[in-house]
Every structure is written in structure tokens, then in C-alpha cells.
């Protein structure tokens, strides 16, 4: 466990009951398709089109810039000398360094796709898997009840991802960079992964969460800016293990008051 550090406490999120969930701006796909991309004259941003097609086919939406990744990997050996955390370095290379026409996804569109099971090949198990995206934040999925496997890998989320009072099948943010994770009272049937180079600027809050499988913080970076507590699991019920191997908590403490971990 990490020792408690002093400093200003970040504003605690108000209880879920006092914050009504935000809804996507668009109610239909046609509303989002009103945006015409100037470069190719087609509706939606290119990455949004690719995400929609991938969800419909049950495939991975791969937006990684492989040319840039290969170029940067040539310098990986020198960087490993100063930072032996391989997962953190690889994730920093794979994550997009900036927003481009080919990786940008509007947060409203992402939420619209995530909550609309009509786009999925199978409603029994919805599969959303995107890698290398730059998602405009915040992602508001609070109060959502779905059987979705939600995987946002090696991506950048400009704001927080808000998941309180929601229900998912699995969630992985492995290798992604996010402002903060608010997962109060969340229900996840299987695993929740925030490792493999995952980075959060402020905190991860699992107060009252019910996770049927494991929680993996391994090789994650938790900066805890102005936070007394950076990883919070108060009152959480976890059906599997909680992994902290090589996790880096730069500020704040890990708190597990009343948590039940099998």
C-alpha cells in the first residue's frame, strides 16, 4: 500500500442521486451524420465511421498509427535504460500524441454507439473495442445498463469517464490515458482492467462497486494530482483478485475501507 501524502484534497464527486446523467446530443444516427467531414465529403469523422463498422461486425476498431509506432520503437532501448517499466513506455508510444482527423471521436457519438445495442451483431454480448482513439471528453455512461464488453485501449480520453450506477459485462481501459475514473456503485459481471500502462491524472473511484471478476491496476500510473486518495475501493465487492504489480501511485493513497475482496 502507498503511504498517505499530504496536500489538497480534490473535490469529492457528489452522490450519484444528485447528478442526473447526461444524454447524447444525437438521438439517431442521422443526427450525427449531419456533420459532413470536409476532407472527403462523407458523414461523420473517419474514426467514427470505422468504429460504427467495427461494432456492427463485432471487430476491433484499430486506429493505431503503426508507422509512427514503428519509428518510435527504434528509440525504445535507450528509454528503457532510464525507465524499466516496459508497459508504461509501450503504452506511451501506442497512444496517439495528438488529435487527428483519423483518430478523433466525439464523446456524444461514442456514448450513442455504446448504449445503442441495435448496432451490434449480437444483443446477447455487445462488443465495443477501440484502440488508438482520441475521444473528446467527458464520456458519460452513468446509469447505463448493458451487456457490453467495453474496451478502450491505448487511447486518450480528454476528460473523465463517468460510470457510476452503470452495469457492464467487462471493461478495459488498458494502456489508455484519462483524466479520472468515476465508477461509484458500478456493476461489472467479470473483470475491470486499468493496467498495462494505463494512466490517470487524478483518481479512480470504485466506492460501492460490485466487480464479479478481478480488478487489474498492474503497471498503471496513477498521478493523483491534488488528491489525498488516488485509488478508492471503499465498500467495494470484488469477486476475484486485485492486482497492483508495478503500479505507480505518484500522489495520494490507496483506500479500501470496508472492501470485500475474495
Image (spheres, rainbow, N blue to C red):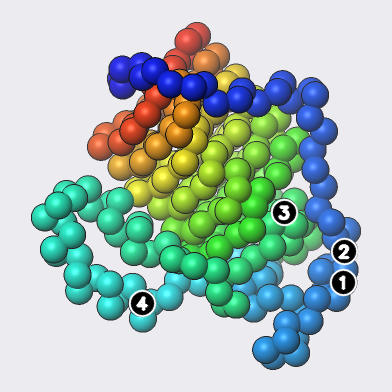
Measure how far apart labels 3 and 1 are at the Cα level.
15 Å
Number of the front mark, 4 or 2? 4
Residue sitting farthest toward the top: 258
- Reading the image, the residue beneath label 3 is 111
- Asked which secondary structure carries label 4, the reply is helix
Q: Are marks 3 and 1 in contact (CB under 8 Å)?
A: no
CA neighbours of label 1 inside 10 A, class few (<14), some (14 to 19), many (20+): few
In the image: residue 78, left or right of residue 30: left
**Residue 249, above or below 198:** above
Q: Nearer the viewer, residue 91 or 125?
A: 91
Closer to the chain start, of discs 4 and 2, is 2
In the image: residue 114, left or right of residue 217: right
- Asked which secondary structure carries label 2, the reply is loop
Q: Nearer the viewer, residue 61 or 34?
A: 34
Measure how far apart labels 3 and 2 are at the Cα level.
12 Å
**Residue 221, above or below 19:** below
CA neighbours of label 4 inside 10 A, class few (<14), some (14 to 19), many (20+): few
For the point 78% across and 81% down, the residue is 36
Number of the front mark, 4 or 1? 4
Image position, residue 146 (x, y; %): 71, 43
Q: Are marks 1 and 2 in contact (CB under 8 Å)?
A: yes
Measure how far apart labels 4 and 2 are at the Cα level.
35 Å
Question: Which of the labelled discs sits on residue 30, or is there none?
Answer: 1
- Reading the image, the residue beneath label 2 is 28
Name the quadrant containing residue 118.
bottom right
For the point 72% across and 54% down, the residue is 111
Number of the front mark, 3 or 4? 4
Q: Are marks 4 and 2 in contact (CB under 8 Å)?
A: no
Closer to the chain start, of discs 4 and 1, is 1
Image position, residue 212 (x, y; %): 52, 29
Amino acid at each position: 500500500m502507498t503511504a498517505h501524502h499530504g496536500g489538497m484534497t480534490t473535490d469529492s464527486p457528489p452522490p450519484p442521486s444528485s447528478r442526473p446523467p447526461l444524454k447524447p446530443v444525437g438521438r439517431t444516427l442521422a443526427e450525427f451524420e449531419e456533420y459532413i467531414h470536409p476532407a472527403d465529403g462523407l458523414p461523420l469523422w473517419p474514426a467514427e465511421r470505422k468504429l460504427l463498422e467495427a461494432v456492427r461486425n463485432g471487430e476491433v476498431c484499430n486506429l493505431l498509427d503503426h508507422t509512427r509506432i514503428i519509428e518510435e520503437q527504434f528509440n525504445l532501448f535507450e528509454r528503457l535504460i532510464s525507465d524499466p517499466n516496459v508497459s508504461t513506455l509501450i503504452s506511451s508510444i501506442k497512444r496517439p500524441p495528438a488529435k487527428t482527423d483519423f483518430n478523433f471521436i466525439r464523446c456524444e457519438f461514442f456514448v450513442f454507439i455504446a448504449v445503442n445495442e441495435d448496432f451490434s451483431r449480437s444483443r446477447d454480448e455487445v462488443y465495443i473495442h477501440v484502440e488508438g482513439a482520441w475521444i473528446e471528453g467527458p464520456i458519460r455512461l452513468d446509469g447505463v445498463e448493458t451487456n457490453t464488453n467495453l474496451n478502450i485501449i491505448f487511447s486518450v480520453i480528454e476528460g473523465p469517464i463517468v460510470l457510476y450506477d452503470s452495469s457492464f459485462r467487462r471493461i478495459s481501459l488498458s494502456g489508455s490515458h484519462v483524466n479520472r475514473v468515476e465508477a461509484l456503485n458500478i456493476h461489472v459481471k467479470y473483470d475491470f482492467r486499468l493496467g498495462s500502462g494505463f494512466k490517470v491524472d487524478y483518481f479512480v473511484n470504485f466506492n460501492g462497486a460490485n466487480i464479479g471478476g478481478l480488478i487489474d491496476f498492474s503497471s498503471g500510473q496513477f498521478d493523483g494530482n491534488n488528491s489525498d486518495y488516488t485509488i478508492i475501493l471503499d465498500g467495494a465487492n470484488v469477486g476475484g483478485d486485485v492486482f497492483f504489480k508495478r503500479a505507480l501511485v505518484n500522489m495520494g493513497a490507496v483506500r479500501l475501507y470496508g472492501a470485500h475482496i475474495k
